[in-house]
Amino acid sequence: MDSCIARFMRNQMPSYTVDDDTPFAELWMGTHPSGPSVVVGSTPDQNNITLLHFLSNYPEYAGNVRIVTKYGKNLPFLFKVLSVRKALSIQAHPDKALAEKLHHDDPFHYPDANHKPELAIALTEFEALCGFRPYEEIEFFLNNVPEFKNVVGADAAKTFSETVDKKQGLKDMFTSMMNSSESVIRENLTSLQARWYWSNQSESDQRLEMIRKVFVKLNKEFPNDIGCFSVFWFNYLVLQPGEAIFIGEDEPHAYFRGGMCVSF
């Protein structure tokens, strides 16, 4: 069994069954409606009920009066343990106002009205993509990786290089790439794969060589996927045990690979 979390669950609950062929990347502990924890209590009224139900009956366990008054009979955080063998999808958590609107408009798909800033702490070496790179780094890749520039589009790349409003230029350029045709994306992924993987051609520039290795891993897992170009957009981080990253509202991120980390 490859998943550290699956092994952890089985060690803690011998009766818990996990299909060895089923991905098991996250363990949630909290009151989130999509995956609520279940309490094992010492009395019948406390046993085998959701944590939310338990805290509704015993709000003192949620903390002091001030916490209960502010957040209600609920936990104001979701504790997660992550074990990632294959890159997870890129996502960005909404701010509080948008989270509340999404929950109000579509509670089935957005059961939680809270925003979700996140703190992730590595327990083993852990790789992640987090936040857009500095503008000069993205421009470096545009100038040195022709396949990346091709999917972005020459006009969008030129505008980004020349504009003073880099934030808007970045937004326009990212939008341009996401609107590229499937044929353009496939053609340039194939080209980059041939150059960086099949020929095993290394790069003399350290920045390119590091990203080449990351791209090769990602492309193996998600061939012909536009997300493989994410390595040129987002900061690639390798956390050592005890190191952490904070992921704010609206911050694009993806957990890439690692034995285990905790987040909340």
Image (spheres, rainbow, N blue to C red):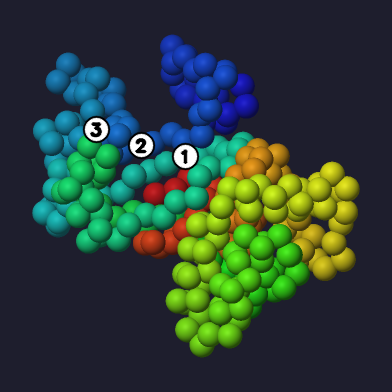
Residue labelled with disc 3: 51
Q: Position of residue 212 (x, y in %)?
A: 76, 55
**Marks 2 and 1, how far apart at CA:** 8 Å
| Secondary element at image label 2 | strand
Kind of residue at badge 2? Met
In the rendered view, tell whether residue 220 sits above or below residue 4.
below
Instruction: Give the left or right position of residue 236, taking residue 15 as reference.
Output: right
Which circle marks residue 29 in the picture?
2
In the rendered view, tell whether residue 188 sits above or below residue 36.
below
Q: Position of residue 160 (x, y in %)?
A: 56, 78
Instruction: Give the left or right position of residue 8, taking residue 29 as reference.
Output: right
Residue at image location 82% in from the left, 53% down from the top: 195
Q: Residues within 10 Å of mark 3 (few under 14, many from 20)?
A: many
Q: Earlier in the sequence, mark 2 or mark 3?
A: 2
Determine if residue 214 is in view. no
Q: Residues within 10 Å of mark 1 (few under 14, many from 20)?
A: many
In the rendered view, tell whether residue 28 sits above or below residue 18.
below
**Marks 3 and 1, how far apart at CA:** 17 Å
Residue at image location 20% in from the left, 44% down from the top: 106
Q: Earlier in the sequence, mark 3 or mark 1?
A: 3
Kind of residue at badge 1? Val
Q: Position of residue 58 (x, y in %)?
A: 14, 36
Residue labelled with disc 1: 81
Closer to the camera, 122 or 168? 168
**Marks 2 and 3, how far apart at CA:** 9 Å
Closer to the camera, 146 or 79? 146
| Secondary element at image label 1 | strand
Instruction: Give the left or right position of residue 220, taking residue 72 as reference.
Output: right
Quarter of the image where the N terminus is located: top right
Task: Give yes or no for contact between labels 2 and 1 (Cβ–Cβ under 8 Å).
Answer: yes
